[in-house]
Image: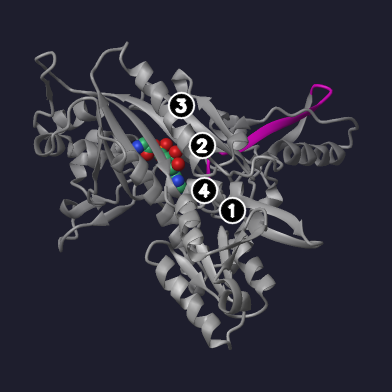
Amino acid sequence: MSSPSNTDSPKPSPELMQELVALCKRRGFIFQSSEIYGGINGFFDFGPLGAELKKNIKDAWWQDMVHRREDIVGLDSAIVQHPKVWKSSGHLDGFSDPMVDCKASKLRYRADQLYYSAVTVEGETVGYVSVLEDATMQDQAQKAAQKLVKKSGKSGTGTINLKKYTEANAEEYALIPSPATGEAGSLTPPREFNLMFKTQVGAMSDASGDAYLRPETAQGIFINFKNVTDSSRVKLPFGIAQIGKAFRNEITPRNYIFRSREFEQMEMEYFIPPGEDVWPSYHKEWIEWCRNWLISIGLRKDLIGEEVHGKNDLAHYSKACTDLTFHFPFGEQELWGIAVRGNFDLTQHQGGSGKSLEYFDEAVKEKYLPHVIEPAVGVDRIFLATLVSAYAEDEIGGEKRNLLKFHPRLAPYKVAVFPLVKNKEEIVAKSREIFDHLSKRYHCFYDAAGAVGRRYRRMDEIGTPYCITVDFDTIEKDQKVTLRDRDSATQERLSLDELYKKLEDKLLF
Ligand code: GAP
């Protein structure tokens, strides 16, 4: 797998986030959902270019994960499932985050993302500070601490030791200032908040109609395990993959599309034989597969990291988990979790439904509940990591330009076709002929408006890898066109046969 990723660029700064948010709105990648009504927090709409980029990410994953492997099949399960699914999976009782309310401002925070510290000078506590988790929280807290020191009339540097609000004790709750008001006394103790969105199925408005929007696509796979093994000729080890929407009523959706309330997941459950000596090699293989795949679609290799979860940090179903992380402009964060789920889910659904979900292994003539390795990733997070990786600024002929160096596989448009002028019939006809030919295969853009230089810039900014210009020489001299490369801005003259061959080499994956 090769990548044209933009690895020589510096680490993404917080300012890059503002740049990307503005670019996404300006060029139609992402809009705040329900914007004309003032927006709704944690929901986003994907515009014409965003819809293409998102589809290309999902298509590439499906192609590589399902079509190009003989051991993985696809699934598309319902978003609303029997409520017992969520009882058995543990989500009804345990899928929650600790929440803290500010009684004064009516704002809510995730208690594990709200940090606090006592501020001490020469061993004496002069007050408390609080900050919300982000890449600069240490600096923010230190600045707030210095203000407290000054107010107390003391001199010297205030010492702080940031801890999560979940670690605070009952006495401290009353002393920690709310991040909203800066005043102490309004924060409640943390309490668990279930993240599932509740809905009602059918005409009855009592509890018999209670249902939930799925908080992960994974459970749809587990409850269909028997259906898939009975209807397809899969044999262990094999995987079931699914792409689809998931919903979580996040207490504090933030960092743009990184943590939203409606998002899309690409999950694959890879079923393997049981045994403590079996899963480690499969787990390792999947971690490497996921990392290589991210690099193959253009994510910056230097921004991809890895975090191995400690025993105390594992989800209720997990035996082990490694996250592939990404260095976003707001810090290094989880991108793709590769979890070892054991046979937790199949055991739970077998118990909950009373139906056997055992698999008969012909090779050893034994029945058992297979174990599972689960690579689970959010499409929206890959989308954001793709933008961060692709964003670049350079200079062409003394002029500054912004560009998105998307991997051609993900680029919303693959090719743009320009007639040099729009009032010369033969040039327009040839351009249309090329556009019609290419758009049978690739998503193409036709643009006849303005100077060619400006048309190139517009395509650079939305990440179109190739532009083709039809000019007077094409018609009057050589039947050749100009192919211009987005990243190098170099141009070459090619016959149509050469052009089509070259684009096939560059754009078919
Ligand atoms: N089935 C396992 C599971 O759902 P998870 O770590 O909760 O595990 C998997 O979610 C992936 O889904 C995450 O690594 C992340 O990429 C994405 N994801 C989770 N919550 C998200 C949210 N609120 N907004 C966007 N993406 C999210």
Which mark sits nearer the N-terminus, 4 or 3? 4
Q: Which residue is mark 3?
A: 322
Q: Secondary structure at mark 3?
A: strand
Q: Amino acid at mark 2?
A: Glu
Quick one: label 3, few (<14), some, or many (20+) residues within 10 Å?
many
Which mark sits nearer the N-terminus, 1 or 2? 1
Q: Position of residue 127 (x, y in %)?
A: 74, 35
Counting labels gives: 4
1 vs 3, front mark: 3
Q: Residue at x 37, y 51 (%)?
A: 59
Left or right, 332 with respect to 429, comes to right
Q: Secondary structure at mark 1?
A: loop
Magenta segment includes 15: no
Q: How is the image coloured?
A: one colour
Tell me the tag on residue 258: 4
Q: CA distance from mark 1 to mark 2?
A: 33 Å
Q: Are marks 2 and 4 in contact (CB under 8 Å)?
A: no
Judge: label 2 CB < 8 Å from ligand 1.
Answer: yes
Q: Position of residue 258 (x, y in %)?
A: 52, 48
Left or right, 264 with respect to 381, comes to left
Above or below 21: residue 359? above
Which mark sits nearer the N-terminus, 4 or 1? 1
Along the viewing direction, whichever of 57 and 326 lies nearer the viewer: 57
The answer to whether any part of residue 144 appears in the image is: yes
